[in-house]
Amino acid sequence: MPTDIAKSKVTPDQILQDMARLTTRQLERVIEQAAFLRLQKSKVALSARESNLLQIINRGLTAEKSARLDELQARLRDETIGEREHAQLLRLTEELERLGAERLKALIELSAIRKTSVAQLMEELNLAEAAYA
């Protein structure tokens, strides 16, 4: 005799609580997959190029590099940074700027594909207008 097993429904609040326990890198991966799932559920088919552009847009420094950048910036503000650390700070800053430029280029291309403005695209994708690390 088959019996129905009541499946517990997961709430958005429970999901957010679980997400709060993830590392930065894990959280970025979940957010990227959630954005893709949202597009699938809304039955919006992405071209391979759009998918690639979204990956570029969502790319950032690794959690380790981001933490190191924050640490080096704090040492610079405190005027306790050494020569080697200053050189590392410059490299990380250049990498962040390169990622930002690639992100902007991808946003421009994707907005052209979707025939919308960059500002509107960023709003649709829930992206902050400020630079990110």
Image: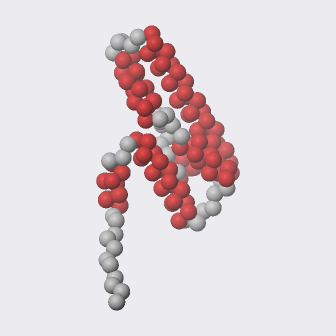
Q: Looking at this view, is 27 or 106 the one in front? A: 27
Is residue 81 shown to the viewer in this render?
A: yes
Q: How is the image coloured?
A: secondary structure
x 63%, y 57%: residue? 46
The residue lying at 36 percent from left, 18 percent from top is 75
Residue 118 seen from this side: no
Task: Kindly identify the residue that appears in the image at 55 percent across and 24 percent down.
Answer: 94
- Tally of numbered tags: 0
Task: Kindly identify the residue that appears in the image at 61 percent across and 36 percent down.
Answer: 102
* Image vertical order of residue 104 relative to residue 121, above or below: above
> Is 8 placed left or right of 129 in the picture?
left
Quarter of the N terminus within the rendering: bottom left
| Relative to 34, 17 lies left or right | left
Q: Residue furthest front?
A: 1
Quadrant in the picture for residue 12: bottom left
Residue 86 in picture, x, y percent from top left: 45, 14
Compared with residue 62, is residue 51 higher up or lower down, i.e. above or below? below
- Residue 104 position, x and y percent, is 60, 38
Determine the residue located farthest toward the top in the rendered image: 83
Q: Is residue 84 above or below residue 97?
A: above
Q: Is residue 42 above or below residue 58?
A: below
